[in-house]
Image (cartoon, helix red, strand yellow):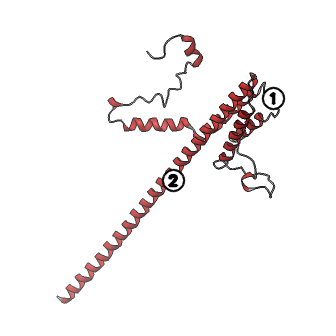
Amino acid sequence: MQSVFVTDVKTFADLAAILAAIVALASCVVAVHYSHETKLDSDFATAMNWRRDFREWASLTIVALVEAKEGCSWAAAGEKDNQALATFRTRLWIQTEQGRLFLPNQPGKADVGEILAYRGYRHAVLDPVVAAHYVLRGRQHAFASAPDALEHLQKLFVSRVQAILDPAHVNAQVARMIRDSARSKVDQTNTAGLDPDLSDIPSGARALLASGKSIVE
């Protein structure tokens, strides 16, 4: 009887050890899973914060480019204001330098003695902003006028920023999330504004003006 009892005790101890090992393994799996989820959440938050800050910088740069273009238009009309033009130049240069914090120079041939942030090739997104600064300083260009040059540079900047932010892809994802969050097919939210039908060609601004009709029905 004692031998059987001892055997039962050993068996129980072995089972307890196995169960403890299983619990420990499960705890490790859960810990790894939550650690992975936490890292994904952290990476997502970092990406979202970067996009927000980058969009804010780009928006302020667009404001500076538009103001510079309008300032040059006034100058061309005989209302030259050197102080205003100097302010526009300063704002553009500030935006350029702040942009380097998001878009560092690309590796390339560079003087080893050059300061770190200015080694290699300037990022292409910043080129239109620098070029606009040159225009305001009176540098020669191939456009009909300074306002024409600045308008082209503004559009080029917006296009290059848009290529980074990819709003079409983001809007499609947002539209999908809105549709998925609808409680029933009856309550499906119309997301055509975010994810439009590519076959539905917009009429354009001139067509709206030519129609002579109120936009609000």
Amino acid type at circle 1 is Ala
Quarter of the image that includes the C terminus: top left
Amino acid type at circle 2 is Asp
The extreme bottom residue here reads: 2
Q: Residue at x 59, y 37 (%)?
A: 59
- Would you name the residue on which mark 1 appears? 142
Point out residue 132 in the picture as x, y percentages from the top left corner. Answer: 73, 35
CA distance for labels 1 and 2: 45 Å
Check disc 1 and report its element: helix, strand or loop: loop
Check disc 2 and report its element: helix, strand or loop: helix
Query: Is 38 left, or right, of 86 in this rendering?
Result: left
Query: Is 81 left, or right, of 2 in this rendering?
Result: right
Q: Residue at x 71, y 53 (%)?
A: 117
Q: Residue at x 77, y 34 (%)?
A: 135
Q: Nearer the viewer, residue 84 or 22?
A: 84
The extreme left residue here reads: 1
Point out residue 71 in the picture as x, y percentages from the top left corner. Answer: 70, 29
